[in-house]
Amino acid sequence: MVDNRDEPAHLRGGEALFSAAAAKRVAILISGRGSNMMALIEQARGYQVVLVASDTPDAPGLAWARDHGIATFALSPRGIGKPAMEGAILAECTRRDVQVIALAGYMRLLSPGFIAAMRGSIVNIHPSLLPLYKGLDTHARALAAGDPQAGCSVHLVTEELDGGRVLGQSRVPIEPGDTPDTLAARVLRAEHALYPRILAEFCMTPLDRIRSLALQLPESEERESHGQPTFFVAGKQFAQVRDDHHGDGRYVVCVRTGGADEQAMLIEAAPNTYSRPAYLGPTGWVAVDLSGDPDWALVEDRIAHSWELAAPARLLEAGGR
Ligand code: GRF
């Protein structure tokens, strides 16, 4: 049996937290060896890789993907130009109902038309701690700057080179005597752990993500209450997801606060994020908005705080969350 207790809860739960039908369909674009592609395929949970595509027909990673039963598509822009090549890749993605594109060592800038067609659904891994060292030669630049640390970043792809929002980062030390190659090897190991984890998070629905956050807290369990997914610790509710509850058009997670004062303060300070939920509002709960692009660090914090307010002394004395 695999000991995976150190993994984040949404991965620890394995497939239990994801239904195969909901797993997002991912295409990976590569130009070369494809070691990140291999990591994404080998560690795929919560998403399924349905296509590996390349601008380089002899990219070594393509053969590996084919050997592992993944559909591949390769077309060089030579002779036909980049727009035609990108158009063909996009058509292949459409044909296979691809929902998310993961760039993994794809060495060509995507054109604005391609990015617009998949806006908000393309991610990339870059071997630096963005916003440091966009572009090439990241390791040599980190060494020349005398940085104590290097790392890698997974980010959204926008028209600005390596400029989209950072979704997750991993840091590694820079050791005395490091060369760009030794540093690259250390960063690459971190890339292989980071990319599958962040892609899984990126592909989760908000409800998957709330589940992963709530169920990683000690003795927490999920049951339905009033038809809504609700999370309990030792029989007490601490989080409830509401999707258009009684037709209010909102998608929220309700959590406990310290009381009416904290509730009022939160709603006044951030009325777009917090609101007073029906039924639970009078007892000091707040609803945290999940529509659009929620602040997941804040949601995680609020759920954990709510668990602390509901958990029995025995669990808090045992070290809490
Ligand atoms: C990785 O360092 C990645 O961060 C960068 O290109 C390299 C690709 O390596 N974008 P591989 O093809 O995944 O082995």
Image (tube, rainbow, N blue to C red):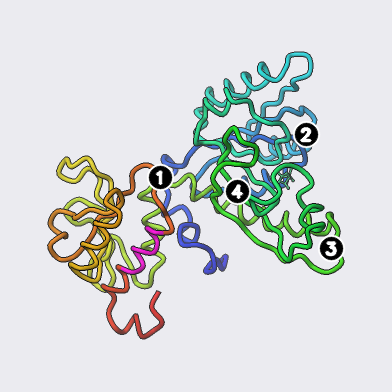
Viewer-nearest residue: 140 or 22: 140
Relative placement, left or right, of 61 versus 86 is: right
Residue where numbered disc 3 is placed = 178
Specify the amino acid type for callout 3.
Answer: Asp
The span from disc 2 to disc 1 (Cα, nearest Å) is 35 Å
Check disc 4 and report the residue beneath it.
Answer: 154
Badge 4 amino acid: Val
Q: Earlier in the sequence, mark 1 or mark 3?
A: 3
Tell me the CA gap for discs 2 and 4: 22 Å
Q: Amino acid at mark 2?
A: Ala
First along the sequence among labels 3 and 2:
2
Identify which amino acid the numbered label 1 is placed on: Asp
Is-magenta flag for residue 303? Answer: yes
Q: Is the CB–ligand 1 distance for label 4 below 8 Å?
A: no
Report the residue that reaches farthest toward the top. Answer: 80
- Range shown magenta: 298-305
Which percent across, then down, holds residue 139? 78, 53
Q: Position of residue 153 (x, y in %)?
A: 62, 51
Verify whether residue 68 appears in magenta: no
Question: In which quadrant of the rendered view does residue 111 lie?
Answer: top right
